[in-house]
Structure formats: structure tokens, C-alpha cells
């Protein structure tokens, strides 16, 4: 019975209070967190930890939550289950907006944070990830009829049709075959991978529909350049994810300004600020903007993602990856 003395519980708000007191690394392991009669009750995954590490994790959770107002006792349950791989779709609705480059650099930035990351190249007809992650010419092995992802030099595992089909060969496949190909890539031997970023092809076609039907992502990141035409297509992609009950994590504005390497003048060939305004109008988080730079283009062609280094070109990717990591840990991109 709900009274003034016993107001209705708000589980989501309770969990948010507890998560706010914990580090992102611990939040990454949490299965549930709730408050019951002044007690914090937390369930966390520890199947991959040693006995010593499990004890340290439990102690850290207890110490952190004892500081939360109104908590008189902390109860911690550690499960032996391995963490479930989270699927994050990166889509655009339109080609040529830098979606593949963003996917690669987000994956590399997350790996540098200590996350176990994999990339699936969902663009069956036009795969880019072998070049972007420097794995061209390599072939994946097969174990028990499943593909084994390739390990890039940047701590990111990757699978692409570009690793399977002969270089330069055009694929003349009908829609259902592309859906099956995507399923093979997702159902591969990803082992302890925590996060799988799916680099989707442009549009809202067979690959996207097959993914939503058989492998619904945990969330989606939308990419667009600032001009109106690209934003229209990004809106269509967003509608598809909405229809599939996939949360939209946020929007990224790519190719946002170009700095001339000769004179330093900044121009906006694709416009400026359009994606942020679009995100605000739709009440979708804005994750950040990535400028159009020669270094990013050259690094992509060379298979050395900017996010792997410490240059100025890495900073925008790292900032967006931090917001994505926060969403994975807490369900919100806000700090």
C-alpha cells in the first residue's frame, strides 16, 4: 500500500543513485542494483576474476555504497556468469558520411580504455574494416563451423566479408544472403569480447532488417554530416531503430569543419552544427563532432587509426568513446 510514509518505489532512480557512486569499471560488471529497506542490494558479474580479485571487487563495492545517503547496509552477490557481449550498431542511413572510420576509431579508443572490443563489418557489398584496421589479406580460421575473428594490431578483433571474399571481387548476392552473412559474422567465436560494434551499410535494407530480427542491438549510434540531405537519411535510420525497440545512444556530427593545413583557415564545406540542432530537436543525446582532417584520411588508408595515437586527430574519437562507455556502464551518456 502506498502512503505518504511509504511512497512508491522508483527502481530506476534507485539504481541510478547506486551506480553514480561506483566507478565505470564496476558499473560495467553490474547486473542489478536496488535499495530495499535502507539496504543496497547489488549483483555483479565476476566469472572471469580470480578469488583475490573477487574479494577486492566486493570490498570496493561495499566501501563505495556505504557513502550513499540513506544506506545502512550493503549486500553484494557475485555471479559466476561471464559478461554478455553487448551489440552496438553504428548506422547512418546514407553512404559517405564516415561511419566506418568512426566505428574503427571508437573501437580502438574503447580498447585503449581496457575494454575487450570487436568490430563486425556489416557492409557486405562494400567492406572497409580490413583496410581501416590493417588486416587486409588475412583470412579467418574456422572452429566447429564458426569463424574465428582476426586480431588487429590495436587490440580490436574484427571480421568482415573482405576477409573471406577475394580482394576486388564483386558480390552479386540477393538480400537474404546478406542477412545470413551478417549472422555468420555475429555468431563467430568472439570469446571474451565485451562489446561488438557493428559497422552497418548505408540505408535501411536487408542487412538492417535481418539484424533487428535475429540479433537486436543493445543500442545504436547514428552518424551524419551537417547538411540537410544527410540528416534526412539519418532520421530514417533512427526511425528504423525506434521501430525495432533499439535505444538510440546518440548522434555524431562527422566532417564538421576543415582546417587548411597551409593557412589554418577553417571552412565548413558540409555546414556546421546541423546534427547538434537536430539531436536537440529530437531530444537525442549529441555525442560530439569529428572534424574533416587530412590526417584522419591518410591514417585510414594506411590502416593506422588516429585513435591509436595521441595526436590532435585522436581527441574527438576518444571523447565520443568515453560517452559511449558511460552509456554502456550507466545507461546514460551524461557524466
Image (cartoon, helix red, strand yellow):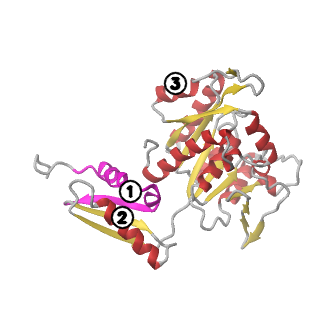
The reply, left or right, for residue 68 in relation to residue 229 is left
Q: In the image, is residue 233 above or below residue 211?
A: above
Is residue 134 visible in the rendered image? The answer is yes
Tell me the crowding category of disc 3: few under 14, some 14 to 19, or many 20 or more residues within 10 angstroms, Cα based.
few
Sequence order check: which comes first, mark 2 or mark 3?
Answer: 2
Q: What residue is disc 3 on?
A: 277
Q: Secondary structure at mark 3?
A: helix
Marks 1 & 3, CB-CB < 8 Å contact: no
Marks 2 & 3, CB-CB < 8 Å contact: no
Residue 19 rendering spot, x and y as whole percentages: 37, 54
Q: In the image, is residue 162 above or below residue 30?
A: above
Q: Bounds of the magenta span?
A: 9-37
Tell me the crowding category of disc 2: few under 14, some 14 to 19, or many 20 or more residues within 10 angstroms, Cα based.
many
Q: What residue is disc 1 on?
A: 22
Number of callouts in the render?
A: 3
Q: CA distance from mark 2 to mark 3?
A: 39 Å
Q: What residue is disc 2 on?
A: 61
Marks 2 & 1, CB-CB < 8 Å contact: yes
Q: CA distance from mark 1 to mark 3?
A: 32 Å
Q: Quadrant of residue 92?
A: top right
Q: Secondary structure at mark 1?
A: loop
Q: Nearer the viewer, mark 1 or mark 3?
A: 1
Amino acid at each position: 500500500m502506498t502512503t505518504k510514509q511509504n511512497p512508491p518505489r522508483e527502481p530506476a532512480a534507485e539504481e541510478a543513485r547506486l551506480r553514480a557512486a561506483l566507478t565505470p569499471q564496476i558499473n560495467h560488471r553490474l547486473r542489478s542494483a536496488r535499495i530495499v529497506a535502507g539496504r543496497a542490494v547489488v549483483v555483479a558479474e565476476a566469472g572471469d576474476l580470480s578469488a583475490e580479485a573477487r574479494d577486492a571487487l566486493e570490498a570496493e563495492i561495499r566501501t563505495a555504497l556505504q557513502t550513499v545517503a540513506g544506506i545502512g547496509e550493503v549486500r553484494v552477490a557475485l555471479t559466476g556468469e561471464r559478461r554478455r557481449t553487448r551489440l552496438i550498431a553504428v548506422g547512418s542511413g546514407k553512404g559517405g558520411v564516415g561511419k566506418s572510420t568512426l566505428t574503427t576509431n571508437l573501437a580502438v579508443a574503447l580498447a585503449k580504455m581496457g575494454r575487450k572490443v570487436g568490430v563486425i563489418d556489416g557492409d557486405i557489398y562494400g567492406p572497409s574494416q580490413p583496410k581501416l584496421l590493417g588486416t587486409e589479406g588475412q583470412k579467418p580460421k574456422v572452429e566447429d563451423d564458426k569463424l574465428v575473428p582476426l586480431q588487429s594490431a590495436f587490440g580490436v578483433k574484427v571480421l568482415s566479408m573482405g576477409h573471406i571474399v577475394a580482394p576486388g571481387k564483386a558480390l552479386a548476392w540477393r538480400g537474404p544472403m546478406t542477412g545470413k552473412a551478417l549472422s555468420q559474422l555475429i555468431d563467430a567465436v568472439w570469446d571474451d569480447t565485451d562489446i561488438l560494434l557493428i559497422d552497418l551499410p548505408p540505408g535501411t535494407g536487408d542487412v538492417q532488417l535481418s539484424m533487428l530480427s535475429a540479433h537486436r542491438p543493445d543500442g545504436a549510434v547514428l552518424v551524419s554530416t551537417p547538411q540537410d540531405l544527410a540528416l534526412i537519411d539519418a532520421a530514417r535510420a533512427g526511425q528504423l531503430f525506434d521501430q525495432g525497440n533499439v535505444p538510440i545512444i546518440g548522434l555524431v556530427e562527422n566532417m564538421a569543419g576543415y582546417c587548411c593545413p597551409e593557412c589554418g583557415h577553417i571552412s565548413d564545406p558540409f555546414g556546421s552544427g546541423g546534427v547538434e540542432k537536430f539531436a536537440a530537436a529530437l531530444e537525442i543525446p549529441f555525442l560530439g563532432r569529428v572534424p574533416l582532417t587530412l590526417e584522419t584520411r591518410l591514417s585510414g588508408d594506411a590502416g593506422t587509426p588516429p585513435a591509436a595515437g595521441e595526436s590532435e586527430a585522436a581527441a574527438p574519437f576518444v571523447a565520443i568513446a568515453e560517452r559511449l562507455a558511460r552509456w554502456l556502464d550507466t545507461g546514460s551518456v551524461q557524466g
